[in-house]
Amino acid sequence: MNEIKRIVRRIKEGRLKQLIGELLWMYLYVRQYWLLIGIYILLGASGSILSLGTSVVSKNLVDAITGVNSMEIIWVAVTYVIMGISQIFINAVKSQLALKVQLKVTTEIRTDVYEQVLRTNWESLAKYRSGDLLYRVNGDANIVANTILSFFPNVVSTLISFGGAFVVVVQNDPAMAFIALLGAPVSFITSRYSAKKMRDFQRDNQSMASNRTVFNQETFQNLQFIKAFGILDRVTEKFRQIQNETVDITLKQNKFQQYMTIITSLVGQVVGYACYGFAAFRLWQGQISYGTMTMFVTMSGSLRGSFRGILNLMPMLIRTGISAERIIEVISLPRDSMEDKEEAEEMKVKAKEQGVYVHMETVDFAYEKEKWIYQNANFRAEPGEIVALIGPSGQGKTTTLNLLLGLYHPQQGKIQVGNPSGNSLKASSSTRCLFSYIPQGNTLFTGSIKENMCMVKPEASDQEIQAALEAACAWEFVEKLEHGVNTEVRERGNRFSEGQKQRLSIARAILADAPIMILDEATSALDVAMERKVLRRIIKKDPHRTVIVAAHRPSVFSMCNRIYKIADLRITEIDKSEVQEFLNEF
C-alpha cells in the first residue's frame, strides 16, 4: 500500500513523467542505430552465455580430472579451450563495435543538441552562460551517449548472467540458490537509500563542471584584461577555490559510496562464506562431486555479482537522467520562428531596386516585464538613408538594434520591414536575412581573412571579397600583408589593430549584401576622416541600402538623414542642432 502511495505521489510530482520523457528522448537516438546496438547487445549476451557455459564445463573438467567421469576428459578440455578462445574474439569484436556505435551516437547527439541550441530563441537562451551551454553540448551529451551504449547492453548481459546462474543453481540445489540470494534484500534497501543521495551528488557534480567550464572560458577570453590589471593571483586563487570545491564534492560522494560498498560487501562476504560452507558440507557428506562444488561456488558468486550489478546500474541511470534533464531543459526552449522566410527572401531580391525600410510603431519593451527600456517608441529608417541612434550608455541603443534584428520582441507595438512598394513583415528571425550587422567589439573568428569574409557568403569570388574590403577601406592594409586575404586572423583578430578589425568586420557585412546595415559603435576605433570615408563608400556601393548607426561622436551625425535619441523611456527624433546639446548632457 505504501509503495502504491509513493508511485502516485511521484506521478503527481511529475517525476515519473519526467523520467519517461528522458528515456523517450534517449530512445530517439537509439532507434537510429538499433541494428548496431542490437548486435552489440547480442555480443554481450553471447559473452555472458559463454561465461555461464564455461562454469558448467569447468565442473565437468574437474570431475573428469578427479576420475568421476574420466572418459570425457578430452572432449571437455577441448570444449573449455574453444569457449575461452571464443570469448577472446567476441570481446575483440565487441570492443570495436562499441567504439563505432559510441562515436556515431555521440556525434549525432552533440550535433543535434548543438544545432537546436543555435536555433533557440535568443531571448530565452541569453539567460544561460556560454560555458554552461558548452558543457551541456559536450559533457552532458557524452554522458548520455555512453549510457545509451553501455546501460541497455549491461542490463541484458547482467539479466542473462543472473537468470542463467539462478536456473543452473536451482536445478542442482534450490537451497544453494536461496543462500546465494540472502543478501539481496540488504542490497535492495541500501540502493533505495543511496539513490536520492546519489542524485544530489550528481547534480552538484554537473553544476560544478559547468561552473568550471564557464570560469575557464572567461579567464582565457579576458586574459589580456587580467594581465593588464595584475590580478593573476586573484584569478589563480579563484581557480584553486573552484578546484577545491570540486574535490570536496567528489570526496563526499566517494565517502558515501564507500560506506554503501562496505555494507553490501560485508553482506556479500557473509553470504559467500555461507555458500562455500554449504557446498563444502555437501561435498563432505558425499552428496556432490568436486566439480559440482566448484560450479556451486562459481555460480553463487555470479548470482550475487549479477544482482549487485543490476543495482549498480542505478548510479549510471541517475547520472544520465540528470544530464538528459539538463540537455532537454535547453532544447525545450522556444525556437526561432522561420515562418516568413520565403517572403523575406523575395523582399531581399526586390531590395536591389527598391531597398528595404524599417519602422517601429508605438513599441513598448522591458526586460523580464519590469525593467522598462522605453514605451510608445517610434522610429523609421528608409532606403538610402543613414539614421543615427544616440543616448546615454545602457539606455537602450543596442537593445533597439536587437529588436530590429528580431532577437528580442516588444511587449506592445510592432516593428515592420518591407519594400517601399511591397508588403511588409514583422521583424523576426525570418527577416534577419535582410540585415548585415556589425556589433560592438570584435567578432572575428580564428582562420584567414578570406575564411572570415566567406562566412556570410561562402560562394564569394576573390573579386567580390576585394571589392568589399575596398568599400570598407580595409584593402589598403590587407594587400600589403605577406599572404593577403589568406593571412591568418588569429583568435579574436589579435594580430590587427582595433581600427583594422572594425574595417574587416564592416567589409564582411558589406559582402553579405543585405539591404539594411546596422553599425553598433562599429566605427569607434576609426579617426573622423576614415569614419566618414567608410560611411560614404557604404552608401556609394549600394544607394538603396538603409544604414542604421548607434554612435556617440558628432562626426557621424552630420552625415545622417535623421537622428533619434533614447532617454527617459522614450525614443525622440531630434534636429542636428540639438545633438551637441544632448551630447553635453551625458
Image (spheres, rainbow, N blue to C red):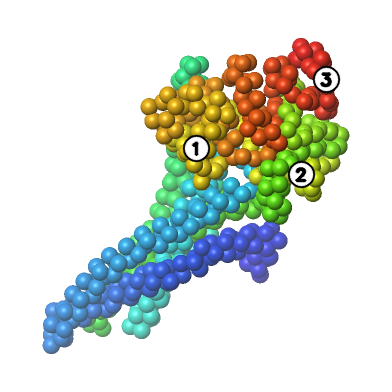
Q: Is residue 136 left or right of residue 302?
A: right
Asked if 486 appears above or below 259 in the picture, the reply is: above
**Three-letter code, disc 1:** Gln
Which SS class for mark 1?
helix
Pointer 2 local density, CA inside 10 Å: few below 14, some 14–19, many at least 20 = many
Residue 220 on image: x %, y %: 47, 29
Quadrant of the image containing the N terminus: bottom right
Q: Name the residue at 49% across, 17% down.
A: 228
Name the mark on residue 365. Answer: none
**Three-letter code, disc 3:** Asp
| Residue that lies at the very extreme toward the bottom in this rendered image | 71
Q: What residue is pinned by disc 3?
A: 575
| Quarter occupied by residue 266 | bottom left
Disc 2 to disc 1, C-alpha distance: 29 Å
Q: What residue is pinned by disc 2?
A: 419
Q: Nearer the observer, disc 2 or disc 1?
A: 1
Q: Nearer the observer, disc 3 or disc 1?
A: 1
- Residue 563 visible at all: yes
**Three-letter code, disc 2:** Asn
Residue 247 on image: x %, y %: 44, 38
Mark 2 or 1 closer to N-term? 2
Q: Is residue 68 left or right of residue 222?
A: left
57 or 303, which lies in front?
Answer: 57
Pointer 3 local density, CA inside 10 Å: few below 14, some 14–19, many at least 20 = few
Q: What residue is pinned by disc 1?
A: 463
Which SS class for mark 3?
loop
Asked if 32 appears above or below 473 in the picture, the reply is: below
Disc 2 to disc 3, C-alpha distance: 27 Å
Mark 2 or 3 closer to N-term? 2
153 or 183, which lies in front?
Answer: 153
Q: Name the residue at 41% across, 26% down.
A: 481
